[in-house]
Amino acid sequence: MTPVFHGAWQRSCSATAVILLLLAAGCRTVTPFPSASPYEGRVRVGPLAEFGRNADGVTVTAVRPFYSEKKLDNGDAVRDYLWPVGYSLHEKDSYRGRVLNVFWHRDKTNETTRTAAYSFWFAPLYTQGRTLQGKDYWALFPFYGELPSLLMVEDVKFVMFPAYATYRNTFVKRSYVLWPFYGWIDDERREDEGRRHNFFPFYGTARKGEWRSQYVLWPFWNSRQTVEGARYEQGYNWMLFPLWAQTRTSRETQDMFIPPFFAWGSKTHSLGTTTRVRAPWPFIQYEEGPLISKRDVWPFYGTHTSRDSMKLSEDSSWYCLWPILGAESSSNTTSRLRSRWLVPFYYEQFREVKDAKPDALYGAELTNEELVRAVESGARLRDAHYQRVWPFYTYREADGAFAFQTLALWPQQYGGGVTRCWAPFWTLYARHGRKEGSVDNDLLWGMARWGHGAKGETYFSLFGLMRRYGFEDGTVNWSFF
């Protein structure tokens, strides 16, 4: 090695050693204020490693981005494995997790059957498990399967799919041979009146209560009409795709040209009449009635307001240059949610909840269940204010507690594994406060920390080598190394 390169190598190694020593020393913090525990402390090596107990009373163990664990005193924990490669969550008596496309879940024990429900899924090929009632099940796709639930349906069965398959939605059972070509549907509440036969896409018929429908060469011809003696909405509708569609009932009148692009009509109910026009969809839309008001000139500008029939809840929104600029609000008898955005730079949300429970996401009055739920999915259980100016900072506030972080490279409100495994790499400064009045500042992963407690106590730490504590009685304590 030449003297020039040798000298450069030595200087590089020396600089690296100094940085690592500063990180290792600076991250060792014991800050009695405003921590949940008077002995709270953490050991951090920059954003790479973290061990100890954080200000929320959560034990943290992390070697980022490969592994991260947040654990409560009762054993509940959330763990990430090089997120998004995998994660696991233990909450009360329930376990669930995923590594790549392998999912597992174990539920609490049923006190009656003394069995624990569990499931294992190697997507999309194989799954097995046991229900809370003690029934075992398994499926090997596409050869055979019998599952109590899958996505949005229940009682799923198949043999050599698509040769044969059945599933259920509440009271409606659907069966297929050579899915989706031939099938039939049974509505258990209506017996023979709720049956449909299907020779897709050539011909199909259905009868549900007072309505009969059929199609020929779907989607080109569809029709529906009331049977004789209908008590409520009488009439018919049909569609000759893609040319024309028409609806004529005792409550609704609508015509469609080149459906769904051009449409006009009205619908009457107990509160009045609603008129709607699409010319063409989705660019020009108009709808006006006692429960809805909609104006769309997409993507330039649009407004939308809707209410429930009792007028106890209301949703409203507007946009300009969709999806760049917009706002929306939703309110009912128990809560109100408002948000506004300028994509991708700005997003703000206000949430107001009557009789709200404390929310662990903001570090105020924690409970174990709320903390795990917040750590896993960003639970929103109370009055809260969230603001993000991407990529510069995020700010959260709830019931006197707040959190400020910069930088903020993740462009969503709840990051899950991103927050736990990756966000520390770009969080250069964080400021947290609690409703009792304490504030903590953290710069460069603990290399500098300062703040004050609820009663005026102060602290300052630099590189973990120099510490200053000021107590309520006015005394000051300095410590080095």
Image (cartoon, rainbow, N blue to C red):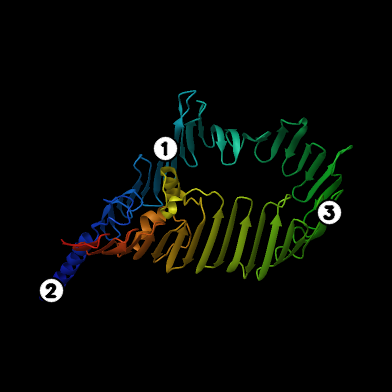
Check if mark 2's residue and mark 1's residue have beta carbons within 8 Å.
Answer: no
Residue 267, image x and y in percent?
A: 82, 54
Whichever of labels 1 and 3 marks the residue nearer the N terminus, that label is 1
Q: SS class of the residue under badge 2?
A: helix
Q: Work out how far the residue at label 3 is from the one at label 2, CA to CA, in angstroms.
A: 85 Å
Q: Position of residue 398 (x, y in %)?
A: 47, 57
Is 210 on the left-hand or right-hand side of 119?
Answer: right
Label 3 secondary element: strand
- According to the image, label 2 marks what residue? 7
Name, please, the residue furthest toward the bottom.
4
Measured as percent of width and height from the top left, residue 28 is found at 23, 57
Q: Position of residue 213 (x, y in %)?
A: 80, 42
Q: Which quadrant would the N terminus be assigned to in this image?
A: bottom left
Instruction: Quickly name the residue at label 1.
Output: 92
> Is there any visible trace of residue 17 in the rendered image?
yes
Using a 10 Å C-alpha cutoff, classify the residue at mark 1 as few (fewer than 14 neighbours), some (14 to 19) or many (20 or more).
some
* Disc 3 target residue: 246
Vertical arrangement, residue 40 with respect to residue 428, above or below: above
| Residue at 57% in and 69% down | 324
